[in-house]
Structure formats: structure tokens, C-alpha cells
Amino acid sequence: MQIGNVSFSSYPLFLAPMEDVTDPAFRLLCKEFGADLVYTEFISADALIRNVKRTEQKLAILEKERPVAIQLYGREPDAMVEAAKIAEAAHPEIIDLNFGCPVKRVAGKGAGAGLLRDIPKMLEITRAVVNAVSVPVTAKTRLGWDAESKIIVELAEQLQDCGIAALAIHGRTRAQMYTGEADWTLIGEVKNNPRMKIPIIGNGDVTTPERAKERFEKYGVDAVMIGRGAIGQPWIFSDIKHFLLTGVLQQKPDVKQQFEIIRRQIESSIEWLDERKGILHVRRHLANTPLFKGIPNFRIVRIAMLRAATKDELFQILGEVESTQLAIHKLQ
């Protein structure tokens, strides 16, 4: 499979763009564990052209994490074009257009998945950005706005006609947000449409190696994108890759290794931002990591961990949790 000048080996696995999640520290870890393409947090076109510092910071790309896609969202063609030109100057391999974010502050203002209610404008934005930059432009969207408007099969053709180099599809409607199960049936229909020539990337509920294998084999997608399934466990890419290539489930990192990975992520986040902001930024990963499953009466410790204000305080709590988990595993 190829997107622009970027070639991918068998069974490509992509890290989905996620706000407050896919910062450089996390992207590097996912890359280390086998992610073939990583995406930035999604970036507001309006904020980028206004030179908002926090937004400009999201353009940072480290050489070790390449190839990287910068994802943009917005509702006006001119702003998206200007933002795409700024993003291109950061030298990503791909610029991705977000037509799928369902949250109210984005979709409710006509950006992200909100453009599923204004297809002419979505296509206008796509054509304008494709014509404005020299790097490949891709798009990510959903099945439709709601159950009564699942338009993705026709929309995929229209986006392809606008010149995009690949299309990622999340198997839910905007109305579903992140509830219920992702429906890959229409993703497969898009992929098997003989008029589609660009790579199709499937996204939604890929949380295990077995599920990733089923998505590739049953629906024929060119790549699988992993989002929430990677939060707190970047090693999921290695687990899936190994299973796809060998058919055998590999042993996950042991407890000590998993805690070491989390500590590395915390340190990288602090280095990228600063101690206070870095700890705040990594809390979502700590809240979702499977490391803490099975610990009895964990709620109090979890609150303390999420309230920790310094690296030393946080590492002390993690050390205590690690000792508890090691003791539990010895008894099993």
C-alpha cells in the first residue's frame, strides 16, 4: 500500500489522531512498538492562522516518529487552505482533513463531523486544500450524520474525485459519538466498490490482535487505524503486528516493563512541555491504562495519582501500585 511517496508493508497499522492523546511523546512510543503511521492531535485551522501558541506547538514533528500526518479541522475553505500551507511548512508526509470529530464544540460549529451535514462545503474544502499543497492530502470521516443518513459509499467517491490520496472511515455515525459498536459493513462496501482506487483505512473498536486480523480479512481494508485501544498501552501495535504476521499471540510486556513504559511516557511528556503541563497531559493515559485492572479498592489510589502535581509524587504512587500489581501476579 502507498500514500503519496510513503510505502507501507503488509498489514499497516495507524495511530488515530486524538486530542490530548497523540502528542510527540505518545507517538514515539507507538512508533517504537510498530505503528506504521502516526497522526498529530487534530489542529484547529482558525487557531493555527491566529498563531495560537498551544496550537502551533501541535505541529512539532520529531524525525524518529516519521512518517507523520498532521490533521486539520475547520469549516471554511480559505482558513483550511491557509492552515494547510502552514502545516506543510512543518514537513509532514501527509496532511489529513478531519471530517469526523463528533464532539459538540467542533461538530456543532460546522467543522469535523458537522460537515457531514454540508457535503458541498466538505468537498469544496477538500478540493481547495488538495490544490493548495504539494504533500498528499487524506481525509477521515464517519458513516454519516445519523442512522438515516449513512452516505459514506457515495461520499467516498466524491472525496476521491476531489483528489485525496487515502480515506479513513470510522464505523460510526456522528449521532453515535463513541457509543455502541462500530459497524464495518459499510467500510467494507466502500473498499469493495470497484470505482474506488485510493487506499481505505478502517477505524473503530480495534482493541485486540484477533479483531484487527478479522478487520483486514473480512473487510479487505488497506490499513487499520487504532485509537482508544492504544491509550495507556502503546504495545498494542506490537501485539497486533506479531499476530498478523505469525498467527500466534505474543506475550505482553510484563508488569515491570509496562510500568517502565508508562514512566518513560511521563518523562517524555514533561520534557516536551514542562512538569506541570506534562503531568496534566499524561493523565488521560494513566486513567485508561490496563495496568491498574484487578487492583482491589483502587479508587482512592487512582484519585491520588490523578492529583499528583510533581513527577516525584507521581512516580512514588506508581511505585506503590507496581509493588501491589507484582504481588498480585505472584499469587496468580
Image (cartoon, rainbow, N blue to C red):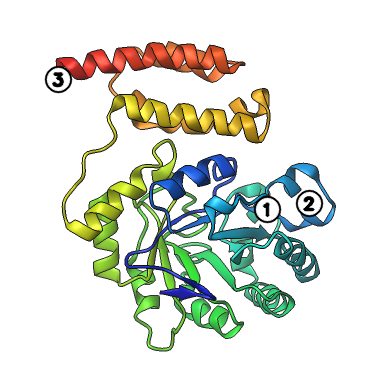
Asked if the residue under mark 1 is in contact with the one under mark 2, i.e. CB atoms within 8 Å, the reply is: yes
Toward which corner of the image does residue 170 lie, by quadrant?
bottom left
Alpha carbon separation for disc pair 1 and 3 = 45 Å
Label 1 sits on what residue type? Ile
The residue indicated by pointer 1 is 43
Return the x and y of residue 190 as percentages of the image width and height. 40, 77
* Quadrant the N terminus occupies: bottom left
Residue 332 is tagged as 3
Eye-nearest disc, 2 or 3 = 3
Q: Residue at x 63, y 48 (%)?
A: 104
Q: Can residue 207 be seen by looking at this rendering?
A: no
Q: Residue at x 15, y 15 (%)?
A: 331
In the current view of this chain or complex, which residue is farthest to the front? 63
| SS under mark 3 | loop
- Depth check: give the residue in front, 309 or 10: 10
Return the x and y of residue 209 as percentages of the image width and height. 26, 51
Alpha carbon separation for disc pair 2 and 1 = 8 Å
The residue indicated by pointer 2 is 47
